[in-house]
Amino acid sequence: MIQNPIPWPNGARCAVAFTFDVDAESLVHLGYRDEADNKIAALSELGYDAEIAVPRIIALYQRYGLKQTFFVPAWCLEQHPAMTDLILQDGHEIAHHGYLHENPNKLSAEEERDWLGHAIETIERTTGRRPRGYRAPSYAFSRNTAGFLIEEGFDYDASLMGDDIPYVLEHPRGRLIELPSTRQLDDWTYFVTSRDFNWMLPTLAPERAYEVYRAEFDAAWRYGGLWIAVWHPFVSARLGRIDAMDRLICDMHDRGGVWFATTEQIAQHVRAVIDAGQWVPRAQKLPYPRGPIPELTPRIGRAAE
């Protein structure tokens, strides 16, 4: 199925990363700038991230000896130093996820560069280490994002969905490793219901969502793919869901041939096999041409007449 499978370390059948986007209260402050302090229920729901969910996730990882990646808006690192320390003390990666979960593709190039740089400085100050990886808040990767990440020396991005295995983003300013996922592995789709965020889909039982997660894992294991979960602690660390997560991790361990790794470790491996000439990745050129495609422009004009 995968035409150009990447060789995983030690002959592993697939690579697995349980990544968490720790947005905490940033979503409320960004969405309700002047009203956030009166959105008490929303603040409590998202505050569950730092107070309950992240410690619970880390305790689960400890049982299995896992080191994983947390994508955290830099503002949240400042607001929750105990959470930040807990993640770092256990050897997990903290990666860039904006400063206040701002959407890059709704910003000017100057604004995006400024937010990106401010978050880098904050992450370095709060963690003692410059971030190596990036995930755009809300997948809002802009036409300028790849170039800015390359300029800032990032090793990888984990925002896009263009393959089942790692690939390379080619840009006039350089190259960037892309570690793709899919919306089918994002917990928001199955579990979030919120009037405050205008997201009112029915909530599914954990078993239904985990049927999808397991199907994606089974295929990744069978064909040599990359399985990256894009989960949120306040969503997936609720008791019923983290219980299902525990069973999934156990089953993956029992299956064997699974490389559990941080996204930084995966990117390092990808670059190593490329540099050694052991694998040639697919490349996607960015940025896309600006504006409407030329084939569409005359039809827009005719339709308006």
Image (cartoon, grey):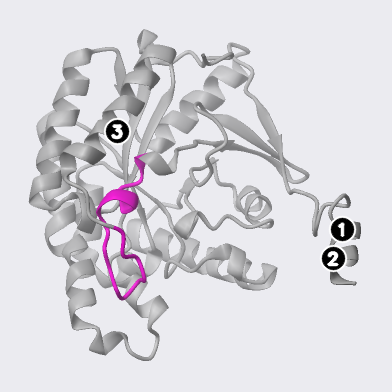
The residue tagged 2 is: 303
- Work out whether 152 lies above or below 301: above
**Residue 246 point in image, percent of width and height:** 13, 35
Q: CA distance from mark 2 to mark 1?
A: 6 Å
Mark positioned earlier in the residue sequence (1 or 3): 3
Q: Amino acid at mark 2?
A: Ala
Instruction: Give the number of the disc on residue 213.
Output: 3
**Residue 137 point in image, percent of width and height:** 46, 59
Q: Is residue 200 magenta?
A: yes
**Residue located 25% across and 58% down the image:** 84
Q: Quadrant of residue 169?
A: top right
Residue segment shown in magenta? 185-201
In this view of the protein, which residue sits in the foreground, 197 or 208?
Answer: 208
Q: Is residue 70 visible in this depiction of the protein?
A: yes
Is disc 2 placed on a helix, strand or loop? Answer: helix
Of labels 2 and 3, the one closer to you: 2
Is disc 1 placed on a helix, strand or loop? Answer: helix
